[in-house]
Image (cartoon, coloured by chain):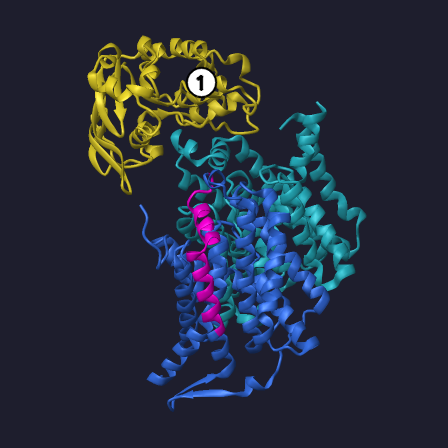
Amino acid sequence: MDFFTTLQAVVNGVLTGALYALVGMGMALIFGVMRIVNFAHGTFMMLGMYATYVLFVQAHVVPYYSFPLVALGMYGLGYLIYMALLRPIHGQSDFMQILLTLGIGLAITDAIQLVFGADYHQINFPLLEKNLHLGSHITVNAPWVVSFGIALVTGGGLYFFVMHTMSGRAARAIAQNRYAAPLMGIHLHRVQAFWFGLGVSAAAVAGSLLLPVFYLYPGVGDQFTLKAFVIVVLGGMESIVGAAMAGVLLGVVESLTSLYWGNEWALAVDFAIFLLVLSLRPSGIFGRQKA
Amino acid sequence: MRRWQLALAGSGFVLSLLVPLVVHSDYQLQVLFRIYLFAALGLAWNLVGGYAGQLSLGHAAYFGAGAYGLALFTRAGMPLWAALVMLVGLAMLFALLIGGVSFRLRGPYFALATIAFAEVLHAAAKNLPRVTGGDVGVPVPALFHTHANRSFYLCAVLLTAATTAATFLISRSRFGYYLMAIREDQETALSVGVNAARTKLHALLVSAAFTALGGALYGSLFLFIVPDQVLSIDISNEIAIVAMLGGAGTLAGPMVGAAVLESASEIFKTIFQEAHLLIYGLLLIVVVLFLPEGIMGGVEAIVRRRK
Amino acid sequence: MNLLEIEHVTKRFGGLLATNDVTFSIREGEIGFIVGPNGAGKTTLFNLISGVFHPDSGTIRFQGRDISRIRPNQAAELGIGRTFQVVKPLRNLTVLENVMLGAFLRTRSGTKAAEESRGVLRYLQMEKIADSPASGLPLPMLKRLEIARALATRPRLILLDEVMSGLSTAEALALAETLKKLPEWGISAVGGVEHVMQVVMSIADRVVVLDHGTVIAEGTAKEVVHEPRVIEAYLGSKYKELGL
């Protein structure tokens, strides 16, 4: 395989990776910073896709305009789910959190299937036909470029918000010391619910952006839950930037795996890397090594 | 276990063996087969997830090893008994690999590693058509040719009985005490000389062996298996849900959990068809929020309050 | 003969020096106490001796053997028992069954483990509650349960982390009376307490005072409380806590 084929795969990988990065950043907030083991993350992404789909089919709004609305709605849903379901089991073992979020994920996925059926859906609008040529050998599909741009802006905004706002500081304070946080006047549950909602909405935005270039079906989010965990672990848990980099890296690795071994191995390679990192360097590739 | 409990378990076993004298419908026998099969699987999971408190969400790996093992080893010309030995060995090998990597990890990382390992196997089964038949699947030899449904049902009952007996013996032994100590507090367990890593691994090996036998039984009933059926995360989830619903770390829990879950899912299938998994999700949420110790744990709490 | 020898042991956590060049030893049949305020490094020291942490530098010897790098379960096998600051009994199990967990280190048989455990419970005057559930015991009994579980492993040395905290003076005295008999069983002990209390003075053969991870005094209880550095460290707000 020649150089340009490989380069094309890397470019595709980076474009996909930007969306993984967004999913991963959401998970880094929820799991890495808040330590809520969220097995419904991909389900929330899937919900974002369906919301975007409904807005497109019913109101003819393309995803690039509807995603802020989807983000807002999913933020609200995330906030409610935290307050109604996760707050009551606060302080219990990971075990219970995993089972609860797994249950939420299964219930939502099957509820969606009940409403929309198990069929695959796709949307179509003129931009999807457009291609951009970089030089004579590299071609990129226009919607990927748009989604890349939006992911970059959203991800950057999220990072800025975490690092430079009061609310972001509160979140990081909770991450560093869960027990002292209430003493510092931080309203633990309101802060956790806020960031849970924000993490959910990041996943949903990724779903909106993915809709134009992907198939839609109820189980589409499942593999993204696991990918999001892989990304957060690779990125070093608390690090939002680490998760973003790990997301892009995963996109590239998958793209190259598809090129050389075939698409069907991509997910297996993700997990193989995950197992390798967990056993050799539990603090992640981009994380700081701890004692 | 008190004498009346032993008597209850014994008579339950004998009555279960007599069921085919009354129930002749193939459909009913198959539902009962599923209940006993998942009771056995839940009991096997319970050793790791309930007694040792390590949340495995990758038991499909051992289940699949059982189903695929039966198919592939007999295809390679092995007699049935050798294939059974080999498939148990294969599952235990997987357990050794998974345990080696993941038992050093704590909390959610263990659960994630078990999923990842099972998913790697799932992908391998899908993508190595020359070995596993790929997505098309592979035929599994029939264990029974006459009265198949009745025989499979009886086999599932026997497997449940064996798993129950093993769990009972383990729970009374030093090994069982050690598992519970690890669940409650690993630091304390280490401080009294428990080799936590080795003890957990032993539990996983026993668990994997029984799970593989369950997988072989399941595969043989269907005569043909595909990766999405025996190696999917749905199988892992279902096994864990059965045990958690009934009561993790209790002897009777998985049996109760299997009976409730499988009947509920049969009823839901007729109402919601494809979306019958909805019940799994809802049951999980209810269990975590309102019945954290499962149905048996809830019953015990009520009995204790009465006293 | 020295049973336990701590030589120049240093342990860091990030920038924090948890123990700094700590040296002391415990002879066979001795009862020692490590005294120091919360955060002085007592628990770290116990964790180092019992293999939970490993020292950054220095050596820990037990019965003449270097144990600086062993794992916690190996420490138990060698004969180092320990209790924890936060008591954690196994829920749903009885007191006896909790103690049996320790006894299983030396025997596989449940009957023998139960027999052994009953002996330990008798020694700690707990035989009456042997068959009660462990959850719901009052704190003094939970502390004793911790000790019973550690003793059931038949240790040569037992580490008692904050064994007196939360007890009334009467309860602490009663416990001290019991601990006093440990050497008769061939068991040495190292306890950790926040202050040199009367109870400590009455049973300690040796007292080591830790402050910010450093040994500032070592000797008999009487010697230690007259050390100028100890008085200085405890002067001001802490003066009264010496309990003299």
Q: Colour of chain A?
A: blue
Q: Secondary structure at mark 1?
A: helix
Q: Residue at x 55, y 84 (%)?
A: A128
Q: Nearer the viewer, residue C24 or A21?
A: A21
Give residue C206's position: percent from left, percent from top: 25, 15
Residue type of the residue flagged with mark 1: Glu
Name above or below for residue B45 compared with residue C20. below
Q: Residues within 10 Å of mark 1 (few under 14, many from 20)?
A: many
Chain letter, yellow in picture:
C
Q: For residue B86, say whether it is visible.
A: no
Q: Which segment did they paint magenta?
A: A150-179
Give residue A133's position: percent from left, percent from top: 43, 88
Q: Chain of mark 1?
A: C
The part of the image, by quadrant, that contains residue A250 is bottom left
Q: Residue at x 43, y 78 (%)?
A: A12
Q: Nearer the viewer, residue B52 or C178?
A: C178
Name above or below for residue C39 compared with residue A253. above
Q: For residue A50, say whether it is visible.
A: yes
Q: Which residue is mark 1?
A: C116
Instruction: Say whether residue B221 is magenta.
Output: no
Chain letter, cyan in picture:
B
The part of the image, by quadrant, that contains residue A215 is bottom right
Q: Residue at x 76, y 57 (%)?
A: B27
Give residue A161's position: percent from left, percent from top: 46, 59
Q: Split into 4 quadrants, where in the image is the N terminus of chain B?
A: top right
Q: Split into 4 quadrants, where in the image is the C terminus of chain B?
A: top right
